[in-house]
């Protein structure tokens, strides 16, 4: 089974746990049987592997998410990198060309495209496999998954099938309606459009060449920034007559807001949190290493991270985005391919960061022009390389780098350090990568 997972979004609706770097799919909030927590993307990836261990999984995503994907899923997952955001049609066209031209997948093979972050059980992935087989068997040029609606939602578009069979031709599509109109659609047998569909590679490659002037994946990648922003629905679906829909009645939730996310949580408190006996329908997600106490609250979500603190009525939490848009602050936590970092203190002329490197990983060999840095190792072992000079390090060691020095650190075991940045202009843009000298 070939699966393309669409991983986009800037994470505004689940602030303060999500931000421009850390989208909602990377928040570790779902408890596994082992007691550890996993994110939406880890959960979906695990579920796919449970159904089809040999599935070829490709994640279509932007540059800002690659480090988090590698951190959470490992280095082996396929990534179709979008040089910039150009909506779903260019992203799907690029991912399709990537499968064909880079991964060597035959244009006669089917691929299933779906969002990276649905909250579903394993019946959903069995249905994805069926969807791919329908496309493989030429049931239609496009085969969609239609979600059986559980209420007259205003958040989704609707698919109206021509019949009531499990697999039917599509009669028409409807945009997101008001509640009254949604009830009318459902009475006609309409299904939610969850953005899940399958096709043979040759179909989307043909449509892409009709709409975009490009030779192959590499040419399309180079031209990507010049492409028109347009959704797959507008560019392809609305102009295609041979479309079938397969019904899906299993568990399916779109966890796009704090309200819907807390509905899927198995426990009321994640992190250090205490609810008194008078709290009702209250959820706490606390990433700070300080206790959080709630008393006498009802229908409230409380979330705390280095980026900020949210205290909100659950229904009101859906309207968070315009307020978060006005918050202009330093991103305080991020996951990288080598580990993670957390900003501890920011002052004029200095920034203090706690860095965690995973065992066997290392930072890029890099330098800064406008700041000095000091590393203090607080746990673990590894080695530093400063201007080509190697040094074994462990807890208590201090390494200083003046502006212009090329440097990196390699972790033998999990390694934690405190990094102090010193300079008049401390900026994420002041970083220059170099080829290793070691």
Image (cartoon, helix red, strand yellow):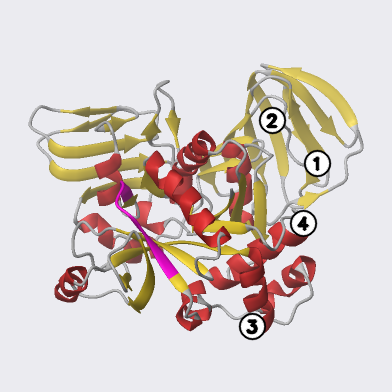
Query: What is the magenta range?
Result: 244-252
Element assignment for label 2: strand
Magenta stretch contains residue 245:
yes
Tag of residue 102: 4
Q: Which of disc 4 and disc 1 is earlier in sequence?
A: 4
Choose between 272 and 2: the one closer to the eye. 2
Secondary structure beneath label 3: helix
Q: Is residue 230 left or right of residue 76?
A: left
Viewer-side label of 1, 4: 4
Q: Cα distance, mark 2 to mark 4?
A: 40 Å
Residue 303 position within the rendered picture, expressed as x and y whole percent measured from the top left: 31, 42
Rate crowding at label 4 as few (under 14), some (14 to 19) or many (20 or more) other CA atoms within 10 Å: some
Magenta residues, dominant SS class: strand
* Residue 425 falls in image quadrant: bottom right
Upstream in sequence: badge 4 or badge 3? 4
Residue located beneath label 1 in the image: 365
Sooner in the amino-acid sequence: mark 2 or mark 3: 3
Mark 3 or mark 1, which is nearer to you? Answer: 3
Separation of residues labelled 2 and 3 (CA atoms): 52 Å
| Residue at 40% from the left image edge and 58% from the top image edge | 12
Cβ–Cβ below 8 Å for labels 3 and 1? no
What residue is pinned by disc 3?
211
- Distance from Cα at disc 1 to Cα at disc 4: 28 Å
* Disc nearest the viewer among 2 and 4: 4
Q: Dot 2 corresponds to which residue?
A: 375
Alpha-carbon neighbours of circle 3 within 10 Å: few (<14), some, or many (≥20)? few
Residue 349 picture location, percent across and down: 61, 48
- Is the residue 53 above or below the residue 257 in the image? above
């Amino acid at each position: 089974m070939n699966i393309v997972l669409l991983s986009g979004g800037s994470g505004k609706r689940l602030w303060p746990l999500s931000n421009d770097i850390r989208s909602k799919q990377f928040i570790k909030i779902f408890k596994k049987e082992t007691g550890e927590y996993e994110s939406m993307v880890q959960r979906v990836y695990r579920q796919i592997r449970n159904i089809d261990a040999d599935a070829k999984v490709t994640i279509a995503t932007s540059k800002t998410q690659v480090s988090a994907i590698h951190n959470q899923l490992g280095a082996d997952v396929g990534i179709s990198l979008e040089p910039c955001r150009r909506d779903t049609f260019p992203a799907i066209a690029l991912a399709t060309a990537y499968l064909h031209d880079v991964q060597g997948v035959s244009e006669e093979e089917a691929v299933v495209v779906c969002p990276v972050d649905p909250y579903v059980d394993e019946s959903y992935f069995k249905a994805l496999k069926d969807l791919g087989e329908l496309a493989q068997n030429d049931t239609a040029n496009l085969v969609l998954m239609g979600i059986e609606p559980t209420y007259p939602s205003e958040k989704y578009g609707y698919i109206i099938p021509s019949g009531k069979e499990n697999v039917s031709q599509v009669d028409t599509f409807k945009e997101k309606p008001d509640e009254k109109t949604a009830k009318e659609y459902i009475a006609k047998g309409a299904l939610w459009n969850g953005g899940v569909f399958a096709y043979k590679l040759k179909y989307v490659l043909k449509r892409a060449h009709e709409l975009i002037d490009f030779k192959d994946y590499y040419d399309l990648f180079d031209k990507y920034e010049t492409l028109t922003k347009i959704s797959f629905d507008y560019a392809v679906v609305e102009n295609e007559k041979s479309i079938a829909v397969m019904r899906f009645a299993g568990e399916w939730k779109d966890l796009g807001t704090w309200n819907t996310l807390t509905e899927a949580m198995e426990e009321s408190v994640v992190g250090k949190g205490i609810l008194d006996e008078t709290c009702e329908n209250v959820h706490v997600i606390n990433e700070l290493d300080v206790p959080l106490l709630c008393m006498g609250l009802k229908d409230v979500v409380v979330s705390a991270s280095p980026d900020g603190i949210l205290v909100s009525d659950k229904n009101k939490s859906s309207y968070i985005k315009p307020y978060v848009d006005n918050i202009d602050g330093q991103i305080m936590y991020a996951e990288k391919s080598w580990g993670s970092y957390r900003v501890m203190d920011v002052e004029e002329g200095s920034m203090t960061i706690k860095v965690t490197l995973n065992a066997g990983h290392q930072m890029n060999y890099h330098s800064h022009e406008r700041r000095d840095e000091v590393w203090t190792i607080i746990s673990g072992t590894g080695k530093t390389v400063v201007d080509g000079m190697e040094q074994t390090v462990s807890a208590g060691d201090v390494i200083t780098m003046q502006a212009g020095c090329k440097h990196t650190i390699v972790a033998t075991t999990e390694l934690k350090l405190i990094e102090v940045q010193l300079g008049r202009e401390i900026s994420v843009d002041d970083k220059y990568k170099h080829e290793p000298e070691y």
